[in-house]
Amino acid sequence: MGFWGRLGRVFTSNANAMVEKMEDPEKILNQTLLDMKDQLIKAKQQVAVAIADEKRLEKQYLAEERKAKDWEDKARLALKAGNEELARKALAEKSSYAQNAAGYKAEWQKQKMMTDKLRTSLKQLSDKIDDAGRKKNLLIARAKRAKAQQDIQSTMSGMNDNSAFSAFDRMSEKVEIAEAKADATAELAEDFAGGNADLDKEFAALAASSAGTDDDLAKMKAEMGLLETKKTDTPKLDTPK
C-alpha cells in the first residue's frame, strides 16, 4: 500500500474511532488533528526526498549535457587544426555524453512531473488539515450540544415516569393526614381543658359585676343622705324607788 493509501486509512480509522467514542469528542478531535499533522510531516519528508531526487537528476542531466557540449567544441577545434581523426574521436565522446544527458533528462522530467503532483497533493492536504483545525471547535461545540440534549431528554424521560412523582403524592397525602390528626388532637385538648375554666370565668365576671354595682349604689346613697343608720340597744338604768 502506498503512502497516500496509508494516510487515508489512518484518517478513516480516526473517523471511526470518533464515531465509537462520541462520549469524548473533544479528545478524539484533538488526537485526530494531531495524527493528521504527524502524517502531514511524514508526507512533507517524503515529498522532500522526491524533490531532492528530482534536483539530483536535473544536475546529472545538465552535467552530461555540458560534457557533450565540451566534446563538440573539441571536435570543432580539431577540425580547424586539420586533424579529422581527433575530431572523429571527440565527436564519439560527445555522442556518448549526449545519450547519457538524454537519459537523465527523460528521468528528470518524469521525476519533476511526479514531484509537481506531490506538491499539489501536499498543499491540498495541508489546506484540509488547516480547515479541520478551524472546524474543530465548531464540531466540539455541536457534539457537546448534542450530548446535552441527549442528557436532558434522558432526564425528562425519567421525570415523566409516574413513580418519580407518585412518591411526592404519597408524602403529600401523609403530611395532610398528620396535620389533620394534629388539629383534631388540639381541638379535643381544648374541649376537655376548657370546660371548668369557662364556668369559672363566668362566675368571676358575675362577681366582679355585682361587687362593682353594690359599691356604686352605696356611694350614691351616701351622697344623698339615704344611708340607714343601725339602731343600737341602750341598756335600761334602774331608777331608785
Image (spheres, rainbow, N blue to C red):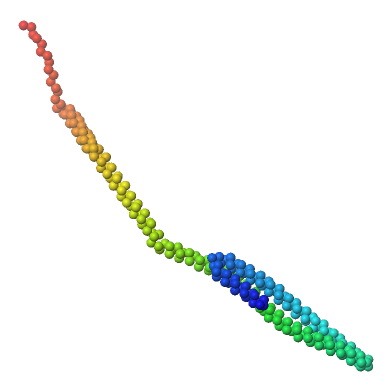
* Residue 29, image x, y percentages: 59, 68
Q: Quadrant of the C terminus?
A: top left
* Residue 147, image x, y percentages: 51, 66
Does residue 110 appear to the left or right of 193 in the view shown?
right
Question: Can residue 22 be spotted in the picture?
Answer: yes
Residue 121 found in image quarter? bottom right
> Which residue reaches farthest top?
241
228 over 163 or under it: above or below: above
* Residue 100, image x, y percentages: 81, 86
User: Which residue is located at x 64 percent, y 75 percent?
Assistant: 6
Does residue 228 appear to the left or right of 10 in the view shown?
left
User: Which residue is located at x 29 percent, y 45 percent?
Assistant: 185
User: Which residue is located at x 85 percent, y 85 percent?
Assistant: 67
Does residue 146 appear to the left or right of 165 in the view shown?
right
User: Which residue is located at x 70 percent, y 81 percent?
Assistant: 114
Q: Quadrant of the N terminus?
A: bottom right
223 over 32 or under it: above or below: above
Question: Can residue 141 be spotted in the picture?
Answer: no
Does residue 177 appear to the left or right of 26 in the view shown?
left
146 over 174 or under it: above or below: below
* Residue 39, image x, y percentages: 66, 72
> Which residue reaches farthest left?
241
Q: Nearer the viewer, residue 23 or 61?
A: 23
Q: Nearer the viewer, residue 197 or 209?
A: 197
